Amino acid sequence: AQSVTQLDSHVSVSEGTPVLLRCNYSSSYSPSLFWYVQHPNKGLQLLLKYTSAATLVKGINGFEAEFKKSETSFHLTKPSAHMSDAAEYFCVVSDGRAFNKFYFGSGTKLNVKP
Amino acid sequence: EAGVTQFPSHSVIEKGQTVTLRCDPISGHDNLYWYRRVMGKEIKFLLHFVKESKQDESGMPNNRFLAERTGGTYSTLKVQPAELEDSGVYFCASSSTGGYTGELFFGEGSRLTVL
């Protein structure tokens, strides 16, 4: 069975400091992993995805994530937070068997303080 | 290129009434998905269309929910009769590829409030 655990429901950082959003997954198959972001009153936007290529994945807006199979983790990081990064972030695992059946984490709300 | 559009953005209805949500996928996308987020919990899969056919409807909560995709273009999700626990945000997504590496493009969601 597939599942995703986002370890923090809320994260607060100061502008210019690093961001770490944690995600652990469970998958019976070789997973594809994604991070999506949702800004208020907007749709979900893809930040980055891992699909069995390089384990360090770079995404948009300076975000990156590292796939660690031994730790079943896919944490999202950014070296320096910007006010515009304030949003809700979702870690997602795709069932390797089924077409695009995504399993979402419960989301992490990122607050960026000036 | 237009993205995934959903209508209405917000609907408030009373228990027992009917609501129909609409999704227009990105033009040319054969795959269309409905997801739901209830009370700040996880976003959960409802069903998946490939063109006009239901590929997977294992996430539909009960028979009060009916999804259609006539002609393989836009899709509707009808809730009849609505119950309090149906309140939440309903997301539609589409993709061009069917494989598990494909990116899903999401709409902004339809927020349903059942009173």
Image (cartoon, rainbow, N blue to C red):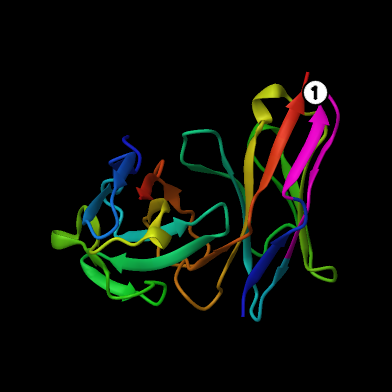
The amino acid at mark 1 is Glu
Question: Percent x, y for residue A61?
Answer: 66, 32
Q: Mark 1 lies on which chain?
A: A
Horizontal relation, residue B70 to residue A26: left or right: left
Is A113 in front, or is A32?
Answer: A113
Q: Quadrant of residue B80?
A: bottom left
Q: Which residue is drawn at 34% across and 62% down?
A: B83
Query: Among all residues in the image, which is located at the extreme top?
Result: A114
Q: What stretch is highlighted in magenta?
A: A9-24
Front-lying residue, B92 or A94: B92
**Relative to residue B23, is residue A31 drawn left or right?**
right
Graded by Cα atoms within 10 Å as few (under 14), some (14 to 19) or many (20 or more), the crowding at tag 1 reads: some
Q: Nearer the viewer, residue A17 or A114?
A: A114
Magenta-colored segment: predominant secondary structure: strand
Question: Dot 1 corresponds to which residue?
Answer: A15
Q: In this view, does A74 lie to the left or right of A3?
A: right
In the depicted view, which residue is nearer to us: A80 or B17?
B17
Quarter that holds the C terminus of chain A: top right
Q: Is residue A17 magenta-colored?
A: yes
Which residue is depicted at the point 56% across and 74% down? A96
Locate residue B46, reporting x and y percent: 40, 67
Relative height, residue A77 to residue A91 (above, below): above
